Image (tube, rainbow, N blue to C red):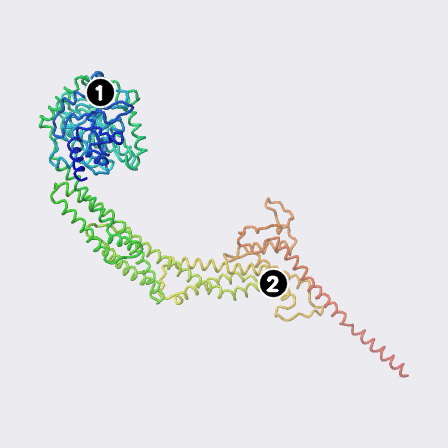
Amino acid sequence: MEARRKRADDIWDAEFDKVRTWRSKSRNRPVNCATDYREFDNEIADGKMEIIVSYDATASGGSCCYSTQIVDGDGSFNEAGVASFVGSSNFADHGTSYTTVAIIGPQSSGKSTLLNHVFDTNFKEMDHRIGRFQTTKGIWIAKGLSTGRFTLVIDIEGTDGRERGEDDTAFERQSALFALAVSDVVLINMWCHDIGREQAANKPLIRTVFEVTMRLSSPRKTTLMFVIRDKTKTPVDSLERALKDDIQKMWDSLPEPKAHKKTPLSECFNVEVVALPSYEEKEVDFKKEVACLRQRFSPNELGGLVGDQPAVVPASEFSFSSQKIWEEIKQNKDLDLPAHKVMVATVRCEAIANENYDAFAQNKEWSKLKEAVQSAPYPGFGDVLSSLLDTYISKYDGETTYYDEGVRSGKRKLLEEKLLHLVQPAFHNLVENISSSTLHEFKEAFNTALDRQEGFSVAVCRCTESFMAQFQEGCADAAIKQANWDTSTVTDELERGMKAHVASVYALKISELTAHCKGKLEQSLSGPVKALLERPNNETWPTLRKILSQEIESVLSGSCTAFPGFDMDDQTKGEIHASLEEHARRVVEAKAREEAGRVLIHMMDSFSRHFSHDSDSILRVWNGGEDVRAITKTSRSAALEVLSVLAVSRLDGDDDGKNVLNTLSSALLGSTNVPARDGNFRTFDPLASNTWEEVESSKTLLKPFECKNWWEQFLAESQTIVSKAFAEQQANKRLRLNPWLIAGVIFLGISAIKKFLR
């Protein structure tokens, strides 16, 4: 079995570059020579697999694409093979009506796969199940079968292949220049993630192509189509702009010969960009987009890549022309590009950097460290992380020792930047946690200091200074030596948090102080205010204003004792004073409104007091000598004064009260007509209103019509007292008899007694 397998491998190694179709005798079907040969190696060894040496490996609808190698891996031109292709494919019959499309790009980037899908060719494709290796050697041509116009498709060996080594870049440069010289459209295959890179995006190759073009006396205008493979979420427009900007910069940076001084890029090249999804991961989408790309190569497609323009040379002369072009390219030593060593160093250093980055990202110690700082501080974070970063950066340095120093240093810097970008969120999480913990401890310490009766300002200064220093120590412990990250934003947030807490505690203390003062104020005002309003008179409101001022000052002066160590500035004291004054006014006005609701009782008390007692407060005896009517009028005036006192609040002054008293006296005690506003003297009721003239509604305790109603009720109730006084006076008058009458009664009585005795 081992011998037969060895024989199969020998056949494969010897014949693979020549054979395009293998056919299984037992299965009676073609076998893809690039992917399926391992499956049939036993049949090859047993002679059950026949080799068909031809140029029709893959057919499309019965047509052949005649894939042929025109330049082998050693750079030898296959003149006979090209001639056979021209004749077999009827290429010579098309004259100048054909289009040439070539593709360049890195090895194993899917160039052959792309051409096979776009043009239905049969270029050998890499079998990813076997491994990544060089598939296309040299330069191959084939007939495209998917477009209406004869299309000559050129598949070129990929660049940066390990089979040629890092220093053998001459063939890569020569094949790229050959493609430019013979092609109408050059497809430049590149990975999406290589955009913006110097080497991986074929920039040195393209720059050399530009330099050669500038040295030609009459350069051919070629379409450069950049095919972006495995596109990502980045918008295609952005990728296109980036590519075109890079290309324009390369063109502008070239030295300008006299023949092409100030020649714009658009005169030599048409630059197109197309992006394709991943063939392996999104095969359906890939094929759909390839179908759209295929349409652009149709000569009838509006705005397509090719048209009816004639080729440079007739098809019959293609073999001779291409051979001469290849010979000129090989003999022209000026076409050599810079050493491929730099390009390989770029690729390898980047790969090593990515490997170390991935290894660090998957490191268990880093994962634990990242998880630990999610919710709490982590002492020693900076030292641990710095050590981990040093480990992987040093590993990169060791693995890239023998590569180009410039490339090595540049990729090292990028690796550091990527690693720092990876760990920076963990650092910021840790700093946020340190800030949160510090703020929590600050609040507890500050509140404890106030509970110990420490001065407010002293506690603020001491705690702020202490815990800000603690936070700075935590940030220093979290810092890594590879970076100098700024923590000023978190520091500012912490300071704002401390100030906000101090402000909230200050506001709470002010609120407690104000509430304490208001409680004391209510307690000190309740007795005097009630006493004054229960027996209102003209001095009631002036006395209330005086009491308010005295009690507010007394309460404020006593607040320092109630809240020791609490410092207040003049503005705060003024605000508290204004608040207490407003509160005191509300207390007094509330009590006044309450007593105003009992105005009838107070009016009756005042009336009874004045009516039933004399000026010396001695109870009157209605024996007939008193003027009841005069006393009633005086008593009612006193009751009216009570009504006027409780009708309007006079905490701001007595002016409003005078107008009310005059209005009440005029309307309820006298018969004087009040002049109207227009100057005519009319008789009307000034109390038939909801408001007092020139008195704010907020100061009104009793509305005018309410005063009238209360007065009528008062008159009804007070009339009873007056009537009783009149009755008592009349009774006393009847008891007081005439002396002559008494003497007559006595005389007559004595006479009657004598007569009776007789």
Q: Amino acid at mark 1?
A: Ser
Instruction: Find the distance from the CA under tag 1 to the CA under tag 2.
Output: 128 Å
Crowding around mark 2 (Cα neighbors within 10 Å: few <14, some 14 to 19, many 20+) is many
Indicate the position of residue 439 as horizontal and vertical percent values. 32, 58
Q: Which residue is mark 1?
A: 89
- Location of the C terminus by quadrant is bottom right
Q: Residue 379, how many percent across, how many down?
A: 25, 58
Can residue 269 be seen?
A: no
To which quarter of the image does residue 125 belong? top left
Relative to 594, is 95 on the left or the right? left
Q: Dot 1, how many residues are within 10 Å of its Cα: few (below 14), some (14-19), or many (20+)?
A: some
Task: Describe the element under mark 1 as helix, strand or loop.
Answer: loop
Residue bearing the label numbered 2: 602
Q: Position of residue 23 (x, y in %)?
A: 23, 29
The image quarter in which residue 96 lies: top left
- For image coordinates 36% across by 59% down, the residue present is 569
State which tag comes first along the sequence, 1 or 2.
1
Comparing labels 1 and 2, the label whose residue is closer to the camera: 1
Please identify the quadrant where the N terminus is shown.
top left
Residue at the farthest bottom position? 758
Disc 2 is placed on an element classified as helix
**Picture coordinates of residue 173 (x, y %)?**
14, 30
Q: Amino acid at mark 2?
A: His
Kindly indicate whether the residue at mark 2 contacts the one at mark 1 (C-beta within 8 angstroms): no
Residue 706 seen in the current view: yes
**Pick the front one: 473 or 116:** 116
Residue 130 numbered mark, or none: none
The foreground one among 319 and 267 is: 319
